[in-house]
Amino acid sequence: MEYLQGDSTDLLKYSQDVNCHFARKKCKDVIVAARKLMTSEMHNTVKITPDYKLRLPKLPAPASEQKVKQESRKDEVTMENSKQLSAWSLCLPACRISESVQQLMELALNTLCESVGSSTQCALQLFFTVRNVFQLFDDVVPTYHKENLLKFPHLAAIQHNNCIEGVATFVDMVPGFRKLGAQCFLAQMHVQRAELLERLSTAHNFCNLDDEDNYIAANKAVRQVIHQLKQLGTVWQDVLPVGIYCKAMGNLLNTAITEVIAKIMMLEDISSEDGEHLHTLCQPLIEEGPLVFIPLAEENKNRKYQEEVPLYVRKWSTFKELVIVLRANLQEIVDRWADRKGPLAVEFSSSEVKNLIRALFQNTERRAVALTKIK
């Protein structure tokens, strides 16, 4: 038509690359939407169960696969069975994730679906944009939410789960994201451990408990520890996967009782009144500590795991044995040692038991005899 001059090729180039222009605009919109989701509030959550699955786009079979002939139905069934993944592959444990992260995953998968059937250049642009979304998540979320992730244990648990939800589509990125989630949650664990130890530091090393002020301070410290554990249980139990929850709470309870054991073992003189007071102070930890592991109604199938407190609290048996010794007489202690075969010998060395005996009992002939039996 000679409407355009012969050397005017801009419109022609534009029309030839029209798919790329569309893809470029689409990719920009996806990144903007993704960043908005990453900087939105994290505390609105949705419950994920093991049978929850996002729909992945259906990919065409490779050309080489289409040429494979079926030798027999029996061979086909055998091959299918040998190649099938477990029904639980890439499934998440029951937990809560941010609503914004679920929306982010839907955005990513919808973008991947658009790439299927597009021109090669357009499909590549869309595919790598989705990868860029996840890389952006790695950079933006820990930085933008840094203060709140350290301040609020609830958000740290959600972020831990968000990172195990994230990138099943890009398997090579999974380890990095899981590490990101673990680092966030471990930082929160350090904060909680420091708080527990800070509370116990106000107990005046559990010394001279016949002094009313000392006893009140020690009792308050123990009650605060139990309160902190219960509060964490409230915000974490419905959020974290059961296994992670039990390990986290077990670790924190273990931190508390390990500190209490260390303080008591350092005492050089424990009067009978002090022994009674120490026993009374430790009882709430023994009675109420395990309650944080009691499963929610919908987790009843996990009860057998959650009632095994020593499985998650390494020093639990040691602590219980120490509490028994605080009220035991010399013969009972010797019996529990049982020539290195009793429960006391499992938890303490002979030197530790001897130091406990010296702290708890006056220097008498009976004490000397008992000490000779702790070998």
Image (cartoon, grey):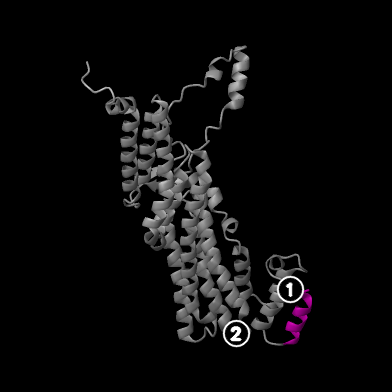
Provide the secondary structure element on which disc 2 rests.
loop
Residue drawn at point x = 45 percent, y = 85 percent: 213
Residue 131 x/y as whole percent: 44, 40
Label drawn at residue 20: none
Q: Which residue is mark 2?
A: 271
Marks 2 and 1, Cα distance to the nearest angstrom?
Answer: 21 Å
Label drawn at residue 350: 1
User: Given contact means CB atoms under 8 Å apart, are the residues at marks 2 and 1 in contact?
Assistant: no
Quadrant location of the C terminus? bottom right
Highlighted range, magenta: 364-375
Task: Name which residue type carries label 1.
Answer: Ser
Residue drawn at point x = 37 percent, y = 34 percent: 111
Provide the secondary structure element on which disc 1 rests.
helix
**Rendered position, 79 above or below 135:** above
Residue 4 x/y as whole percent: 23, 22
Task: Name which residue type carries label 2.
Answer: Ser
Q: Indicate which disc, 2 or 1, sits on the residue closer to the N terminus.
A: 2
